[in-house]
Image (cartoon, grey):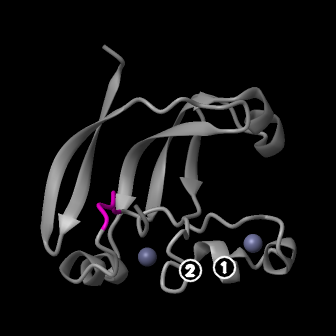
C-alpha cells in the first residue's frame, strides 16, 4: 500500500474530519512541505463557520514547516533544500500575468476564490 498522509479537513460549516490521502508525487519543479505550525487568523474563523465553497478544504494559510521532499529544479529556483524550514505564501499566483510579473500576485485571477472556481490558494481552496 502506498504511503499515506493525514490531514484535518473542513467538510462543512464548523465540521472537521481527519482524512488520509496518498502521499503526493513530487515533480522536479515541486516540493512537499511537512507542516509544523499552521496559524489561525480571523479569516479562518469566518470561513470555518461559513465556508464560501462546498468542497472539502484543508484549512490553514499561514504555514511553517520543513521541506520533506524537493525536486532538483524547485531547489535551484528557490535556493532551498530538503530539511529547510520555510514559511509558505498562501497565494498561488500564475507567475505569468501582469500582476504576477509586478510581484503583486495577490491580485492574480488564479488566487481569487470568490470570482474563479478554479482558483488556487492554500487554506482557502479544495
Ligand atoms: Zn490570515
Ligand atoms: Zn498571475
Q: Is mark 1 within 8 Å of ligand 2?
A: yes
> x, y (%) of residue 34?
44, 38
Which numbered tag is attached to residue 69?
none
Image quarter where the C terminus lies is: bottom left
Ligand 2 in which quarter: bottom right
- What residue range appears in magenta? 55-59
Disc 1 crowd rating (10 Å Cα; few below 14, some 14-19, many 20+) is some
* Above or below, 59 relative to 17: below
Q: Is residue 58 magenta?
A: yes
At 80% from the left and 80% from the top, the residue drawn is: 99
Quarter of the rendering containing residue 1: top left
Position of 124 compared to 28: left or right?
A: left
Name the residue at the front extreme. 117
Indicate the quadrant where residue 92 lies. Answer: bottom right
Contact check, label 1 and label 2, Cβ < 8 Å: yes
Image coordinates of residue 90 in percent, x first then y, are 54, 65
Q: Position of residue 42 (x, y in %)?
A: 32, 83
Q: Is residue 107 left or right of residue 24?
A: right
Q: Label 2 neighbourhood size at 10 Å, few (<14), some (14-19), many (20+)? A: many
Residue at screen point 64% across, 72% down: 110
* Residue that label 1 marks: 109
Vertical comparison of 33 with 109: above or below: above
The image's mark for residue 112 is 2
Which residue is painted at 59% across and 63% down in the image?
A: 89
The outermost residue toward the top is 1
Q: Residue at x 79, y 33 (%)?
A: 73
* Distance from the alpha carbon under mark 1 to that under mark 2: 6 Å
Residue 62 appears left or right of 93:
left
Amino acid at each position: 500500500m502506498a504511503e499515506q498522509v493525514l490531514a484535518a479537513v473542513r467538510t462543512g460549516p464548523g465540521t472537521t474530519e481527519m482524512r488520509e490521502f496518498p502521499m503526493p508525487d513530487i515533480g522536479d519543479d515541486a516540493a512537499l512541505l511537512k507542516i509544523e505550525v499552521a496559524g489561525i487568523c480571523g479569516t479562518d474563523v469566518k470561513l470555518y463557520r461559513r465556508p464560501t465553497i462546498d468542497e472539502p478544504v484543508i484549512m490553514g494559510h499561514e504555514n511553517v514547516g520543513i521541506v520533506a521532499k524537493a525536486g532538483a529544479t524547485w531547489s535551484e529556483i528557490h535556493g532551498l533544500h530538503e530539511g529547510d524550514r520555510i514559511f509558505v505564501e498562501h497565494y498561488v499566483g500564475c507567475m505569468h500575468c501582469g500582476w504576477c510579473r509586478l510581484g503583486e500576485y495577490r491580485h492574480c485571477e488564479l488566487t481569487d476564490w470568490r470570482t474563479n472556481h478554479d482558483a488556487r490558494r492554500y487554506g482557502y481552496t479544495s
